């Protein structure tokens, strides 16, 4: 693994840069990608961001006023991508047609190396924290638009500074981004205090079918493609629902099962201090952080997926009672 200084030097050497985000993009992968993209453009280096999935409308401000210049990438890097499978089919096909990913910058402790070189800070609350430190090491200024990108990733990956991954450094960097002109008030409004009527309708359907353990310590919410079609909600708008189960009093393990296709389910696990979400997801080849992790299932029955997840909960802590 590269050091911070080596990573900064590698970034400084890049030209015609393609920056890859993970599929089903969130504020951290997009904030990191567009912050770096804007920084390169500010220094006369051609760069663009690529994501296999459509970017949700609420994140469109991150790319505002960025010119869509076509060029053949000479260097490829990824941000906030813990596993090559998370790049998505379109990004993987693009990489296959060009050349391997040269550098991966990430903050997931379960990172599986797929790039030639990696820089991973597993104690960082977000990848955007790392990008801020790298930009400082590179001697590049943070403009207001870059600050907004970085603030977005920091705020969203910490649940607006509520999650246990939030550190004193997280607060210091967020404060610095505000000082540098991050448009934090509307960012917080759209990320944490805004729901559409279709999203509310989807929450109602999901709550009606939510499974709870007898002791109330585990909640499992399932969202099917049929529910998405009924409410006209896209998969990219599901990030708020992922953490909903952990808001219920007494719930220590919150699981959201989200259908992407006939035999394609994405699982998000959120846990309290006493359990490791990463350990549960690792049983199925997934990973992430201690309090938040994910995995994939390629089968058609969400009830069977739920039972497998509950068995993994038992296996990783036999004393857990969930009925």
Image (cartoon, rainbow, N blue to C red):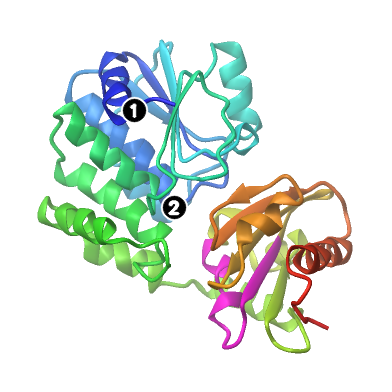
- Name the foreground residue: 280 vs 184: 280
Residue position marked by numbered label 1 in the rendering: 3
* Vertical comparison of 207 with 199: above or below: below
Confirm whether the magenta stretch covers residue 248: yes
Q: Which residues are magenta?
A: 239-257
Compared with 162, 207 (above or below) is below
Q: Against 224, is 200 above or below? A: below
- Towards the viewer: 308 or 16: 308
Q: Is residue 65 visible?
A: no
Query: What SS does tag 2 mark?
Result: helix
Percent x, y of residue 241:
57, 69
Between disc 2 and disc 1, whose residue precedes? 1
Where, by quadrant of the figure, is residue 259 drawn? bottom right
Query: What's the mark number on residue 147?
Result: none
Element class at badge 1: loop
Give x and y (percent) for residue 62. Answer: 32, 45
Q: What residue is shown with label 2?
A: 57
Q: Please report contact status of discs 2 and 1: CB closer than 8 Å, yes or no.
A: no
Residue 231 locus on image (x, y percent): 65, 68
Mark whose residue sits in front, 2 or 1: 1
Question: Is 204 a magenta residue?
Answer: no
- Where in the figure is residue 166, as x and y percent of width and height? 35, 62
Q: Kindly identify the residue that appears in the image at 30 percent across and 30 percent down.
A: 4
At 57% from the left and 88% from the top, the residue drawn is: 249
Q: Is residue 307 left or right of residue 78?
A: right
Point 57% across, 28% down: residue:
91
Place residue 322 in its image quadrant.
Answer: bottom right
């Amino acid at each position: 693994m590269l050091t911070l200084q080596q990573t900064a030097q590698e970034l400084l050497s890049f030209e015609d840069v393609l920056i890859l985000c993970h599929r089903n993009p969130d504020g951290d992968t997009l904030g990191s990608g567009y912050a770096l993209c804007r920084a390169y453009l500010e220094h006369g280096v051609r760069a663009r961001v690529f994501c296999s999935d459509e970017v949700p409308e609420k994140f469109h401000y991150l790319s505002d006023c960025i010119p869509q210049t076509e060029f053949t990438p000479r260097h490829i890097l990824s941000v906030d991508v813990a596993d090559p499978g998370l790049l998505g089919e379109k990004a993987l096909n693009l990489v296959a047609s060009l050349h391997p990913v040269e550098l991966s910058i990430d903050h997931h402790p379960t990172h599986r190396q797929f790039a030639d070189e990696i820089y991973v800070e597993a104690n960082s609350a977000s990848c955007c924290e790392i990008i801020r430190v790298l930009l400082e090491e590179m001697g590049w200024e943070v403009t207001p638009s870059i600050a907004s990108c970085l603030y977005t990733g920091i705020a969203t990956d910490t649940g607006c500074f509520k999650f246990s991954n939030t550190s004193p450094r997280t607060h210091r960097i967020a404060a610095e981004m505000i000082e540098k002109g991050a448009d934090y008030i509307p960012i917080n409004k759209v990320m944490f205090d805004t729901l559409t009527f279709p999203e509310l309708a989807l929450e109602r359907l999901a709550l009606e079918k939510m499974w709870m353990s007898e002791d109330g310590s585990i909640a499992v919410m399932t969202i099917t493609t049929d529910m998405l079609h009924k409410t006209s909600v896209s998969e990219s708008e599901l990030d708020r629902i992922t953490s909903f189960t952990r808001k219920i009093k007494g719930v220590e393990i919150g699981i959201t099962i989200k259908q992407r296709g006939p035999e394609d389910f994405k699982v998000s696990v959120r846990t309290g201090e006493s359990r490791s979400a990463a350990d549960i997801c690792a049983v199925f080849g997934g990973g992430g952080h201690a309090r938040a992790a994910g995995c994939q299932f390629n089968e058609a029955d969400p009830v069977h997926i739920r039972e497998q997840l509950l068995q993994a909960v038992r296996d990783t802590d036999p004393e857990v009672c969930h009925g």
